[in-house]
Amino acid sequence: MLTMTDVLRARRLLAPHLPPTPAWSYPLLDEAAGRTLVLKHENTQPTGAFKVRGALNLLLTERGERGEHGEHGEHGEHGEHGEHDGGPAPIVTYSTGNHARGIAYAARAARREATIVMPIKTAEFKVRAVQALGARVELCGDDMGDAEARAHELAAEHGLRLVSPGDEPALIAGVATAYLELFEQHPGLDTVVVPVGSGTGAAAACIVANAVSPSTKVIAVQSEQAPAAHDSWHAGRCLRRPNTTRVDGLATGRGFEGPQAILRAHLHDFVLVSDDDIDGARRLLARRAHTQAEGAGAAALAAVQRYPGLAGTHVGVIVTGGNATEDELAR
Ligand SMILES: Cc1ncc(COP(=O)(O)O)c(C=O)c1O
C-alpha cells in the first residue's frame, strides 16, 4: 500500500517541473450548487490534465533509479526496468488521451522513448498533442481493450517497459500531490468528489485525505455508460462492464486492482451520472466559472448536481482536465 512518504517524495520530484494549480470558488457557481464549491484546476496543467503528475513521478523516479540525475547525467548500470540496446527500455502504454499526453510529456522530460497505443477513433487533436511532445503513436482497435492488448504485444515483441494506466503505484503517488496541495490550500473540506476511469485519481485522494484530512469524505463518480470501476467497488472485486460512454477519461471497461484495493479501504461512496449530466456540468462550468472542462473534468460537478444530498457543505470538485473534443465544444 502506498504511503504519504511516497507522496511527499513525489512532491519533491515534481516541484521543479509543475507549479501548484489554483483551487478557488466562484459565487455564481456556488449559487447554482447551493453550497460552497472549491474547484481544483487541474485543467491548467501544461498537458491540460492531472495525469501528468503521475507520469512525471513514474519516469523521473525510474530515471533516478538508473542513476541518471539532471539534464546531462550518466546512465547507471542496470535499471530495475530493463536496458535496451544499452539505454533504458522504451516505454509503451495505452490511453484515450490524457494518460498518453502525460506519459509523452514525462518521457520528454526524462529523455526516454515512448510509444502510445490509442484506439483508432481517438480525436485527431489528442493524437497530434502526443506526437508534438515527441512520442510515437500507434492507432489500434475500437477501444481501450484493443489498445491494451496491442501494447502488451509490443512490450513482449520489443522488450519495452509496459506502463499500465492504472496498476502503477508511482502514478498514484504522483497524482496524489494534487490532493496534498488541495488540502493545504483549503483545509476543512467536508467532501471531495473525484471522477474515475482506472481509479488512480480517486485512490490518490483517499490516501491523502486519510493521512492529512481524515474527516473529509472522498466520493468517486463514473459514467453510467461505463460503470466498471463503480460496479467493481460495490462488488468488492474487479469486474468488466460495457463501455459506451462518450466521455474519454472515464471510458474504461474493467476495474484495476491496485486503485480498487485502496478505494475499498478508504472510499466513502461511489456514484454514477449520465453523459448528459456531464454535458450539463460542462455548460455550468463554462458559464459560471469561465472554465473549460472536458467531460471527465466536469463529472465531479455533475455528481454534486445529481446528488444534492452529498455529504458536507464545503465540497472540493476536481476539474481533472480541460481537453474537450470539438464534439464536446460544439455541444
Ligand atoms: C480528465 C480526466 N479525468 C479523470 C480521469 C480518470 O482518472 P483515473 O484513470 O485516474 O481514474 C481521466 C483519465 O484519463 C482523465 O483524463
Image (cartoon, grey):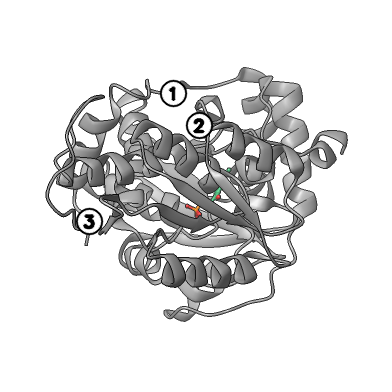
Tell me where residue 2 sits by quadrant. Answer: bottom left
Q: Which mark is residue 21?
A: 1
The residue labelled by disc 2 is 42
Where in the figure is residue 180, as x and y percent of width and height? 30, 35
Q: Are marks 2 and 3 in contact (CB under 8 Å)?
A: no
User: Disc 1 versus disc 2: distance between alpha carbons?
Assistant: 6 Å
- Give, as a three-letter code, the residue at label 1: Thr
Position of 241 relative to 114 (above/below): below
Of the image marks 2 and 3, the number of the one nearer the N terminus: 3
Measuring 32% from the left and 63% from the top, which residue is drawn there? 262
Task: State whether residue 104 appears in this view.
Answer: yes
User: Disc 2 versus disc 3: distance between alpha carbons?
Assistant: 22 Å
133 or 290: nearer the eye? 133
Q: Are marks 1 and 2 in contact (CB under 8 Å)?
A: yes
Q: Are marks 3 and 1 in contact (CB under 8 Å)?
A: no
User: Disc 3 versus disc 1: distance between alpha carbons?
Assistant: 23 Å
Task: State whether residue 256 appears in this view.
Answer: no
- Give, as a three-letter code, the residue at label 3: Leu
